[in-house]
Amino acid sequence: MILYKNKGILPSIWHFHTGPTAKSLLRRLVVVGIYVTIVTVAEMHYTDLRLKDTPGSFLGAMGILLSLLLIFRTNTAYDRFYEGRQAWGELVNNCRNLAIFFNAVLPEGDSESRRFFAKAISNFPFALKNHLRDMPRLDELDMVEEGERRDLSNFDHKPAGVANQLWVKTEALYRAGHISESQHINLNQHLTTLMDVCGICERIKSTPIPFSYMLFIKLFIILYVALLPFTVIVAFGYLTIPAVVLTSYVLVGLEMIGEEIEEPFGMERNDLPLNQLSQLIRVNVHDILQIYLPHVEKQAARPGFTIVT
């Protein structure tokens, strides 16, 4: 995701139209422009299909219905986007709380355990990010401990593998007497939250908006745009061409924006900044547990930093 900064309306408009979604929208508008130009020229000079006699109330009723559908479509897509952001916000807070807990419980001289939890907690958001993007990679994860029960290469579900590492280490500390029973109970809630957040994100990703619903809206938009030039050509003349193109820009643009934000975990411009959020968690956890982290990694977690994905 690219983080936008409000530096003025004109730069924002230009920046928006340099993205892949806007370029795809412009290609569709070219098709609409060609169609409405052919219709306008044919209706004014060569033929009369009598569609210009269609009552304006009919087109108005279609416009109202289409507006209601697009509003519902956009709201549904944004709800998915915002629920994904809430889940990752909960993950940020939970990872910080885990780090604070272990920083308070672990002895100051136990640098090995501190390093383990700093790396393991930081690994979870990166593992979840790559899991949601269907990229089962390990290069962004820090190696914590070797062993069959802790080696992430043995797990197809990487977030579950990281959570398993945290559970195993926590149980070892509990059995060794470094964590009391009440602390162990409270800690279990934070560890469980990790997989709860993972489940929420997986539900959003694996439950798309029904295809028949999206197809119906697309067909409705095509029908509306196809009939529009016939009904306004008497009043607008050749101005029908820019008028219909502008109307299509709004209708098609809203539909495409809904398609983009309904999958919030991808790498498009308006998706969630998962790289930055993951890096923010890594920086915060290492700071809390007093583990050194290179300055360049701290820079990547600052708000406004451009994430290259």
Image (tube, rainbow, N blue to C red):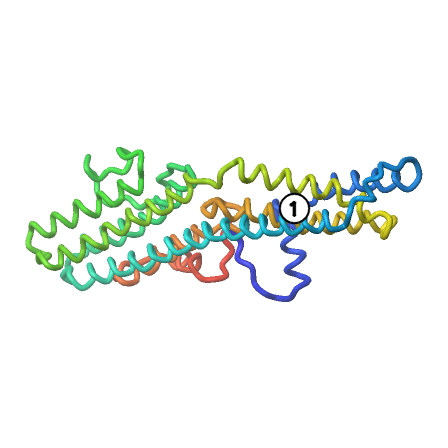
Q: Is residue 51 above or below residue 91?
A: above
Tell me where residue 24 appears, x and y as whole percent.
Answer: 65, 42
Tell me where residue 11 appears, x and y as whole percent.
Answer: 66, 61
- Residue 197 visible here: yes
| Residue at x-position 41% and y-position 39% | 206
**Is 158 on the left-hand or right-hand side of 22?**
left
Could you classify mark 1 by the number of other residues whose Cα lies within 10 Å: few (under 14), some (14-19), or many (20 or more)? Answer: many
> In the image shown, does 194 or 109 lie closer to the viewer?
194
- Amino acid type indicated by mark 1: Val
Q: How many marks?
A: 1
Q: Quadrant of residue 223?
A: top right
**Is 75 on the left-hand or right-hand side of 108?**
right
- Residue 269 visible here: no
Tell me where residue 180 appears, x and y as whole percent.
Answer: 8, 58
Circle 1 SS class: helix
Tell me where residue 211 appears, x and y as whole percent.
Answer: 52, 36
Q: Which residue is mark 1?
A: 252
> In the image shown, does 283 or 213 lie closer to the viewer?
213
| Residue at x-position 92% and y-position 36% | 46
**Is 242 on the left-hand or right-hand side of 204?**
right
> In the image shown, does 247 or 145 lie closer to the viewer?
247
| Residue at x-position 13% and y-position 55% | 184
| Residue at x-position 41% and y-position 37% | 135
> In the image shown, does 47 or 175 lie closer to the viewer?
47
**Is 175 on the left-hand or right-hand side of 228?**
left
